Amino acid sequence: KAGVTQTPRYLIKTRGQQVTLSCSPISGHRSVSWYQQTPGQGLQFLFEYFSETQRNKGNFPGRFSGRQFSNSRSEMNVSTLELGDSALYLCASSQTGKSGNTIYFGEGSWLTVV
Amino acid sequence: DQQVKQNSPSLSVQEGRISILNCDYTNSMFDYFLWYKKYPAEGPTFLISISSIKDKNEDGRFTVFLNKSAKHLSLHIVPSQPGDSAVYFCAASAIRAGNMLTFGGGTRLMVKP
């Protein structure tokens, strides 16, 4: 069974540009969530999607957005990139949207903003 | 205000001995706790979890203990192996908060041969 797949793995963008990251959850998983990891702030929750609906949102500016498709695949978008957006972006999937399920992470997308 | 804290940034243990990683939380709504192992520039790997209705869960060399009254949990690794060297994160999710995880800051474990 394939794990959580994220693309691209590495990318470099320029300040002011936008970026789209993609995530394919484990087959059968309907909940997808996104996290940002930086050295200073650690692992922080961005948002969670379940059945194409955003269920929870972390404390990030509106430049960060996401969506989920009918096949549970998800994308996140960051517009008007800033240097501080350089981070490892992690996607996680779970079978249901309820607390108490194991949550599995992908390998991450490493974004560098120059 | 950090709701999940791992107060030890690093821990060094001899191979074959027990590793004990600690985690404290403040939010009484947390009802599910998970431990992850992580290498640099990779995603966290799930290790073990525990529901708030239990006080212990065991899986092979890994055991997690939960003390709800103290809002404290710990991960025991016995015996420790050099391959266990990584950063370990404690995470918690709350009732009615779906799969939103709140992470601790992590503890770097070094297991010396």
Image (cartoon, coloured by chain):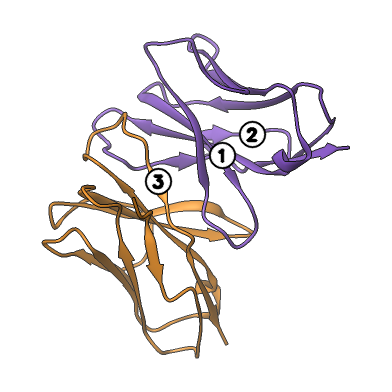
Chain colours: A orange, B purple
The span from disc 2 to disc 1 (Cα, nearest Å) is 6 Å
Q: Give the structural element (helix, strand or loop) at label 2.
A: loop
Q: Residue A62: where, in percent of width, then height?
A: 30, 69
Q: Amino acid at mark 2?
A: Gln
Place of residue A34 in the rendered image (x, y in percent of width and height, measured from the top left) = 37, 57
- The residue located at (60%, 27%) in the rendering is B23
Q: Residue A91 sits in which quadrant?
A: bottom left
Label 2 environment density (alpha carbons within 10 Å; few <14, some 14–19, many ≥20) = many
Label 1: state its secondary structure.
loop
- Callout 1: chain: B
Single out the mark in the foreground, 2 or 3.
3
Residue name at image x 57 percent, y 87 percent: A114
Q: Residue at x 23, y 32 (%)?
A: B96
Give the spatial CA distance, label 3 vs label 1. Answer: 17 Å
Q: Give me the chain letter of mark 3.
A: A
Depth check, mark 3 against mark 1: the one in front is: 3
| Amino acid carrying mark 3 in the image | Tyr
Which disc, if any, is residue B6? 2
Task: Determine whether A56 is above or below A21 in the image.
Answer: above
Which corner quadrant of the image does residue A79 belong to? bottom left
Decide which of tag 2 and tag 1 comes sooner along the chain: 2
Q: Residues within 10 Å of mark 1 (few under 14, many from 20)?
A: many
Q: Which residue is mark 3?
A: A104
